């Protein structure tokens, strides 16, 4: 029973948040935190839980953003349906990249860099072909209604992304407890040993990349609907890939709540440093400096702060 | 397709590859020894380029004459940075080195923005527009110089690593860190030295790039992703790999640009990278790692 | 202080300090009636677009200081403008965050955003509150075409700029006995370059210039040698470019180095065409022609502002005077609205006939938030300066076209 205390408490806080902090600024802040938590978790279940580090997760994010947007803008398909199509497309791309790379035995940095190469290839291709709008990007026509995945009020977006974030944490919790998750942990710790134990490492790795791709792509659809404009650089750019791994690593790689904690802190620090100074560049100097300080003192990520407390209490 | 254009494109591609090799060769050393992607590589290049720029503008030091000074200064900067930040705060975790170098790159880039503004700067030296006729193409002199220098730099590093005591120690640390410690090598110092040498290469690279390129706080981004690609393609830690990889990437970029157009042509780099890795999962000249 | 022998004693100092609030207190009290009007500046201050964002901010700040020094918004009891400074980092999510943050701080209007990718979601966020949003720089016509009633743009969009470019180039070419009959288009891959090139390719034939090829390049591009090679092979009379600053300069430099003989190099909103380009690379810049937002060179205020900016060691680029005029346009609207009420300001801006700018524009006339009275100018670089060559009414010199050959 006690295992449920943390997620239930978190969910209660998250549900109540927009009712207490009602301004659009506060709700937008919540949306951003949860959004980064979702895509950070997508990165984390592959990069942290299964040890398959990627530098190119934007490939899934962009796939999702473009999939639902093209369906919506060009074929008039409702973005709520598009969300599912995006997740499927993300899973497919994830499985494809994984199958190809792992079939040929790619590991570690080589795998990380090949995901980056795929993201770049997708970005360039999207830019070059006509039906994605090319460099012009795609603008989703304004038509505010919940049925259209364009909530008239930000709170609708908040609860949507909260549902996705809850799902992503549920997936992480499930991975911590399931045999699938245990097999992934075995692969992360020592792949040869895992294979010797009879684990089909190839299959497990493809499965987790597909899951990660699906979740990330769903985040992409949300992003497109929230901002109503996407272009190749914004959704396939290296910036997004880095943001995902940063959120996860700063929070605590391979932990259930790491991405959420990382997303919260980095969004807060980002907003905070920008509010602190108007001098050109200074806010990001502080931001980057804080990153270094966090790593210097919390080598396993922010999650250490919490572990420390709980550890003491138990002792 | 006209044969002259094709020939000229091949020459352009190789020359372009030469300038990539300048940036990649230091990175491959860091990669090979520390086994980690150095996200700060681009920003260190950028800082070095500002150094060269200001030496010329404020002290009238020719970029090529600045090479010895820049190499020494950048070595010291790299060594110091490793000792003060990267080595100390990484707690032995590769992942943390990655984050620290990422943090550093954000800090350095914005320090440049803060002090030098975001404006990009170009310089003209007497030889920057001097053109050399090379078969079917006209080649700017600085490009030719940087190509020659990149070959020299790779050879010098390969010699250094193969023949000197420090080089041997670096190889030992790269291969088997614990073993190296057991035979009495100061591993932390060797890591710092390797990082310093890797960054020192950027000092030379900056001197060779400034006469033909612009300087801006974000200029590092232009070279660093392509340099990562080259390092992995060549096989981490291999200088020959970095050189061959760089020439290959330059050639690919040039030819696919010619056939697919400059925008779509960029995809050639990604595709050739993916293809080669699929068939040689540890890069062209990579070991078993 | 006029007497050098005068020494400020301790007592005298205290006395002076005590008297100061009394002396300065009166105007402070008077001003207290009119609360400052907060104007949010949403520009990319860091990242790839940092330079342009910084220039925008500088221009807007100069306008705000000038308006305040002249007594603020008079119809509102001399209320001063107060700038809220924001950094959108050229990221849509950050831009929206900044808009919301400023809303929280009680902003009355926004100026921004430089990049269209940020302007689209940012204007949309501001539309929820109906807060006026004046686009200083931002080329995409989608920004004003979406039916948001709070969005205004004083400068012409790229559609209009291309029309001006075609009209001007047509006249210049005709005067030169149709020296240019063919062109190659080179543009950057994002929205600005692609959109501009598409329009140009459609319209160049109407002035008797055949388009041999349209070449798109990536951002950033590190090397243009091949492109120069292909251009030489196509033997066009003109190269028509639309690129951002770094690629613009690199491309121009490469074409110059490769001695590609042309009647002229012509650009539309050429990112790197400014005074610094002329200063740093005079041989490359000479004879290049650009269609861009430009100030009216015959206007004394424009020249005075140019001097002020240059005295600070900065460049008088298009971002500076577009942002400056955007703020002035906004202030004029507020002056006529007589209140910071958003509906009233929006209505005043929509009905604006403002003509106190120093751009080569006529009186403002807003249609769906876009000023249709705006016009781009055509400019040519010499080795030392930049001159307006079209429209003829504002021209400071005649075009050198076709330019002399290399050999």
Image (cartoon, coloured by chain):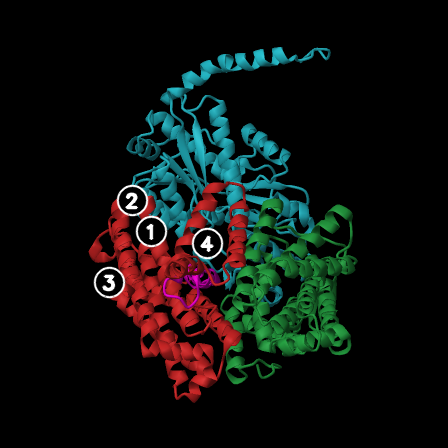
Chain colours: A red, B green, C cyan
Residue corresponding to mark 1: A30
Q: Is mark 2 on a helix, strand or loop?
A: loop
Residue corresponding to mark 3: A80
Q: Kindly indicate whether the residue at mark 2 contacts the one at mark 4 (C-beta within 8 angstroms).
A: no
Per the rendering, the mark at residue C195 is none
Residue corresponding to mark 4: C192
Disc 1/disc 4 C-alpha distance (Å):
33 Å
Per the rendering, the mark at residue A21 is 2
Report the residue at 48% width, 46% height from top. A273
**Are labels 1 and 4 assigned to the same chain?**
no
Chain containing the residue with disc 3: A
Q: C38 or C208, which lies in front? A: C38
Q: Position of residue B52 (x, y in %)?
A: 71, 54
Query: Where does the magenta region start and end?
Result: A232-258
| Depicted B79 relative to depicted C51: above or below | below
**Are labels 4 and 3 assigned to the same chain?**
no
Disc 4/disc 3 C-alpha distance (Å):
31 Å
Chain containing the residue with disc 1: A
Tell me which corner region of the image, top left, top right, bottom left or bottom right, holds residue C82.
Answer: top left
User: Mark 3: few, some, or many residues within 10 Å (few <14, many ≥20)?
Assistant: some
Q: A139 or B37, which lies in front? A: B37
**Are labels 3 and 2 assigned to the same chain?**
yes
Q: Position of residue A233 (x, y in %)?
A: 45, 60
């Amino acid at each position: 029973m006690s295992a449920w205390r943390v997620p239930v408490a978190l969910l209660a806080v998250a549900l109540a948040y927009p009712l207490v902090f009602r301004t659009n600024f506060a709700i937008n802040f919540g949306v951003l935190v949860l959004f980064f938590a979702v895509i950070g978790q997508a990165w984390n279940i592959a990069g942290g839980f299964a040890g398959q580090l990627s530098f190119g997760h934007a490939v899934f994010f962009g796939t999702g953003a473009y999939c639902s947007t093209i369906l919506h803008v060009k074929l008039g398909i409702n973005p709520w349906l598009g969300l599912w199509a995006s997740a499927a497309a993300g899973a497919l791309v994830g499985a494809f990249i994984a199958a190809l790379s792992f079939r040929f035995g790619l590991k570690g940095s080589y795998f990380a860099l090949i995901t980056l190469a795929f993201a770049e290839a997708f970005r360039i291709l999207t830019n070059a072909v006509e039906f994605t709008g090319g460099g012009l990007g795609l603008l989703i026509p304004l038509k505010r209604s919940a049925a259209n995945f364009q909530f008239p009020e930000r709170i609708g977006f908040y609860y949507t992304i909260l549902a996705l974030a809850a799902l992503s944490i549920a997936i992480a919790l499930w991975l911590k407890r399931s045999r699938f998750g245990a097999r992934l942990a075995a692969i992360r710790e020592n792949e040869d040993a895992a294979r010797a134990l009879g684990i089909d490492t190839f299959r497990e790795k493809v499965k987790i990349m597909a899951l990660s791709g699906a979740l990330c792509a769903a985040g992409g659809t949300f992003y497109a609907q929230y901002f109503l404009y996407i272009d190749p650089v914004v959704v396939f750019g290296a910036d997004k890939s880095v943001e995902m791994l940063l959120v996860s690593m700063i929070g605590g790689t391979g932990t259930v709540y790491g991405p959420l904690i990382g997303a919260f802190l980095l969004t807060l620090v980002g907003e905070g440093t920008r509010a602190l100074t108007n001098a050109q560049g200074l806010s990001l100097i502080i931001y980057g400096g804080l990153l270094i300080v966090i790593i210097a003192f919390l080598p396993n990520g922010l999650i250490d702060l919490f572990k420390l407390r709980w550890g003491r209490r138990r002792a | 397709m006209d044969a002259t254009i094709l020939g000229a494109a091949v020459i352009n591609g190789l020359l372009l590859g030469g300038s990539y090799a300048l940036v990649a060769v230091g990175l491959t050393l860091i990669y090979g020894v520390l086994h980690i992607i150095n996200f700060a590589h681009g920003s260190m290049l950028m800082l070095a380029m500002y150094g060269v720029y200001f030496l010329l503008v404020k002290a009238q030091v020719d970029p090529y004459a600045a090479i010895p000074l820049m190499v020494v200064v950048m070595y010291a900067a790299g060594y110091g940075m490793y000792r003060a930040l990267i080595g100390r705060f990484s707690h032995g975790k590769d992942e943390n080195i990655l984050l620290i170098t990422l943090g550093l790159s954000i800090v350095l880039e914005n320090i440049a923005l803060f002090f030098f503004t975001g404006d990009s700067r170009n310089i003209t030296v007497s030889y920057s527009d001097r053109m050399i006729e090379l078969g079917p193409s006209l080649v700017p002199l600085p490009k030719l110089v940087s190509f020659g220098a990149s070959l020299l730099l790779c050879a010098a590093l390969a010699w250094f690593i193969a023949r000197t005591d420090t080089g041997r120690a670096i190889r030992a640390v790269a291969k088997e860190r614990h073993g190296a410690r057991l035979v009495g090598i100061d591993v932390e110092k060797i890591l710092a030295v390797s990082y310093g040498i890797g960054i020192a290469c950027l000092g030379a690279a900056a001197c060779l790039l400034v006469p033909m390129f612009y300087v801006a706080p974000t200029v590092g981004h232009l070279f660093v992703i392509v340099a990562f690609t080259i390092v992995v393609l060549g096989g981490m830690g291999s200088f020959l790999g970095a050189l061959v990889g760089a020439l290959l990437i330059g050639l690919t970029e040039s030819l696919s640009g010619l056939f697919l157009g400059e925008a779509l042509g960029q995809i050639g780099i990604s595709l050739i990278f993916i293809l080669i890795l699929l068939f040689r999962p540890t890069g062209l000249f990579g070991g078993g790692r | 202080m006029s007497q050098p022998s005068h020494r400020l004693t301790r007592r005298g100092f205290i006395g002076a300090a005590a008297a100061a609030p009394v002396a300065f207190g009166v105007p402070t009290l008077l001003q207290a009636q009119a609360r400052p009007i907060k104007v949010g500046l949403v520009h990319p201050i860091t990242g790839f677009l940092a330079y342009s964002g910084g220039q925008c901010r500088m221009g807007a700040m100069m306008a705000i200081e000038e308006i305040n020094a002249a007594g603020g918004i008079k119809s509102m009891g001399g209320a001063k403008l107060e700038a809220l400074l924001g950094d959108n980092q050229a990221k849509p999510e950050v831009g929206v965050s900044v808009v919301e943050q400023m809303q929280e701080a009680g902003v009355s209007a926004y100026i921004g955003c430089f990049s269209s990718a940020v302007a689209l979601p940012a204007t949309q966020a501001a539309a929820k509150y109906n807060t006026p949003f004046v686009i200083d720089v931002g080329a995409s016509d989608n920004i004003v075409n979406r039916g948001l009633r709070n969005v205004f743009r004083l400068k012409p969009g790229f559609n209009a700029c291309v029309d001006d470019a075609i009209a001007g180039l047509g006249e210049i070419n005709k005067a030169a006995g149709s020296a240019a009959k063919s062109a190659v288009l080179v543009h950057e891959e994002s929205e600005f370059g692609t959109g501009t090139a598409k329009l140009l390719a459609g319209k160049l034939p109407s002035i008797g210039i055949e388009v041999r090829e349209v070449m798109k390049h990536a951002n950033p591009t590190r090397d243009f040698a091949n492109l120069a090679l292909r251009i030489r092979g196509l033997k066009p009379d003109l190269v028509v470019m639309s690129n951002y600053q770094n690629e613009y300069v690199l491309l121009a430099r490469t074409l110059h180095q490769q001695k590609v003989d042309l009647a002229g190099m012509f650009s539309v909103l050429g990112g790197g065409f400014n005074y610094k380009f002329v200063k740093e690379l005079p041989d490359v810049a000479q004879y290049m022609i650009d269609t861009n937002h430009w100030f009216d060179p015959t206007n004394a205020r424009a020249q005075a502002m140019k001097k002020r900016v240059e005295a600070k060691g900065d460049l008088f680029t298009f971002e500076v005077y577009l942002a400056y005029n955007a703020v002035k346009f906004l202030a004029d609207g507020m002056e006529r609205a007589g209140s910071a009420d958003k509906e009233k300001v929006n209505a005043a801006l929509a009905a604006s006939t403002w003509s106190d700018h120093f751009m080569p524009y006529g009186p403002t006339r807003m249609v769906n938030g876009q000023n249709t009275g705006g016009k781009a100018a055509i400019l040519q670089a010499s080795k030392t300066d930049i001159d307006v060559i079209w429209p003829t009414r504002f021209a400071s010199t005649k075009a050198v076209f076709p330019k002399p050959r290399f050999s």
